[in-house]
Image (tube, rainbow, N blue to C red):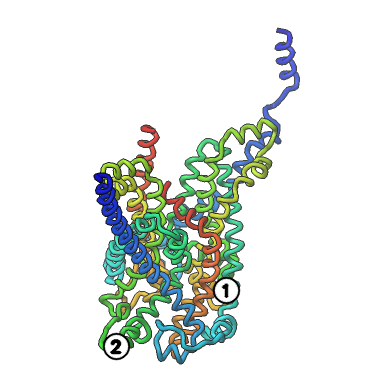
Amino acid sequence: MADVALDRAHDREATMAGRRHFASRVIIYALLTIFAVIYLVPLLILVFNSFREQPEIARNGLIAFPRSFQLTAWADAWSTYCIGGTCEGMRRNFMNSLWMAIPATIISTMLGAMNGYVLSKWRFRGSDVLFTLMLLGVFMPGQIALMPWAFILGKLGLTNSTYGLILVHVVQGISFTTLFCRNYYVSIPDDLIKAARIDGAGFWRIFRKIILPLSPPILIVTVIWQFTGIWNEYLFGVVFTSGREQPITAALVALTASGTNVRAYDVMSAAVLIGALPPLLVYFLGGKYFVRGLTQGAIK
Amino acid sequence: MSSIDTDVGRRTGQANPGPSWRERLTKALPIFVLVPSLAASFVYIFVFTSWTLYISLSNSSLLPSYGFVGLDNYASLWSNRRWNIAYSNLFFFSAFYIVGAMAIGLALAILIDQRVRGEAMWRTIFLYPLAVSFIVTGTVWSWLYNPVDGIQMLVRSLGWTNFNFALASDRNTAIYAIIITGIWQSSGFAMALFLAGLRSVDQDLIKAAQIDGASTFRTYRKVILPVIAPIFLAVAVIQIQFAIKTFDLVAALTRGGPGISTTFPAIYVYDLMFQRGQIGEGAAAAMMMLAALAVVLVPYSFYVVWRHRKESRHG
């Protein structure tokens, strides 16, 4: 009898706790949903407006559900829209960014991997000091380098060229890639290297046979970091190139600033999306590694 | 005895003049590999900085020239109204941006930490703004702030016809437009770091607090957050860096306007160097940016080194 009463009281308490738990769950998910909407709306607006017809956007405003549909804005933005006199759309600038970001990413990552290998597994007197000095490059503001780069690129005949930007991004990127790779290689046991050396393996053989096979995680992090960083960079692009040679970030600013006629939000939305797509793609495909790259530097 | 003798004999007999060129080369190989990167970094970091420092002390205007004028450029920079606006904007922006992004980032991290379903999905949503450029973010938000087509029009079309929202086009409020957009862009970053921190807290510590009957709120405030205190500092330092280097966001969002109201140091450097041909003063402004970064980063790196030493001593 007493047992039953106790059970019942216990049940009531359990349902109360259950209800409280349920309420707190609802609040948690409601808050997350509100934030998610705030984060997603700007992207949705871009996507929607790139498919809406311009007159409808003008009538109903930028923030509205699509009531019209067209694909021409994408075609215009890609190949025919005019920016300051030239009517070639974003295609050329998109390709500029691609031909800048891919080589710069590959070169800076390769250099970073080799530097990291030397600075972690072939230390010599003073190597730690050199590493620390190289790290200073991570913090340098680009503005300090503007005049010297302008002079050097001019001497090399690389002003207003994608090659010039590749050079700038490789030199600036070495600090980051070396930092990432060195901190990763430090965690590879030295005994592994020692054993290989006793077996007669040399510098390159150890790199190829031991270090590189263990490297994919850090190389993916580094490649993602470098590619998105270089693709999204604006300052060097706008200073060292102009017109048809500009990377897409600089071209986007030029495009949206040319606001003499009625703003063609449909085409501009498509153009902005074209500029955002490659890093977004990299992010959605390699999100895990993207986050790892972010947290790596900061936690250590 | 005899074996040792022969050994010694063989060595001396060979008349070895030290390690062969091949051995020397092998030994120096790691350094050879490092040299190109070292040289490039050295030029980039030290030569470029000294170069810009020198230009800042010279009478360069449209082209670099090397007549020494001492601190004239700095004096004229600091007496310039626009530079004063630029750095007071920087302080104002930094304060709100850092506190705002950290508060929202922490809130999101704690929400996600409540064993929610679809954690990966939420994280992906909150962090994606960081993958796209400030140019993209700034452009979209400048449209949202646009009174004719953006948020103001939306609210008016919903029936509130005298609603006013022209944040970015009023010189007194444009800075808030930049702050809001900056927070939107980077609170996901703060979330990622805080979440990594929350996950690294010792689970036994949390269990002990729960057994003691502490509420979730109390557990966070008294047990978890103090443990991840260093992460707050790390996030703040990284965001101050972002703030000092802020250029793209402003360039895409307000272009420094209306008028000169949202000028930032980085914007002003660009303007002086490439729009007005005042290279010397532009270099002085760039040096001030470097100084601002140093003021934040030098003490922080000393602190980090000190903490590592302390930890390794105790560990």
What is the three-letter code of the residue carrying label 2? Gly
Instruction: Tell me if A153 is positioned left or right of A22 in this view.
Output: right
Q: Residue at x 43, y 56 (%)?
A: A140
Q: Nearer the viewer, residue B10 or A56?
A: A56
Q: Is residue B91 above or below residue B14?
A: below
Q: Confirm or deny contact between disc 2 and disc 1 (CB under 8 A).
A: no
Q: Is residue B57 above or below residue A58?
A: above
Q: Residue at x 31, y 79 (%)?
A: B259
Asked if one can make out residue B221 in the rendered structure from this viewpoint, the answer is no
Q: Which residue is mark 2?
A: B159
Q: Position of residue B260 (x, y in %)?
A: 31, 76
Q: Position of residue A228 (x, y in %)?
A: 52, 63
Q: Nearer the viewer, residue B260 or A177?
A: A177
Name the residue at the front extreme.
A1
Q: Residues within 10 Å of mark 1 (few under 14, many from 20)?
A: many
Q: Residues within 10 Å of mark 2 (few under 14, many from 20)?
A: few
Secondary element type, mark 2: loop
Return the mark for residue A94. Answer: 1
Q: Residue at x 31, y 41 (%)?
A: B208
The C terminus of chain B sits in image quarter? top left
- For the residues labelled 2 and 1, the Cα–Cα distance comes to 42 Å
Label 2 chain ID: B
Label 1 chain ID: A
Number of disc labels: 2
Asked if one can make out residue B247 in the rendered structure from this viewpoint, the answer is yes
Q: Position of residue B153 (x, y in %)?
A: 34, 85
Q: Position of residue A89 (x, y in %)?
A: 56, 82
What is the three-letter code of the residue carrying label 1? Phe
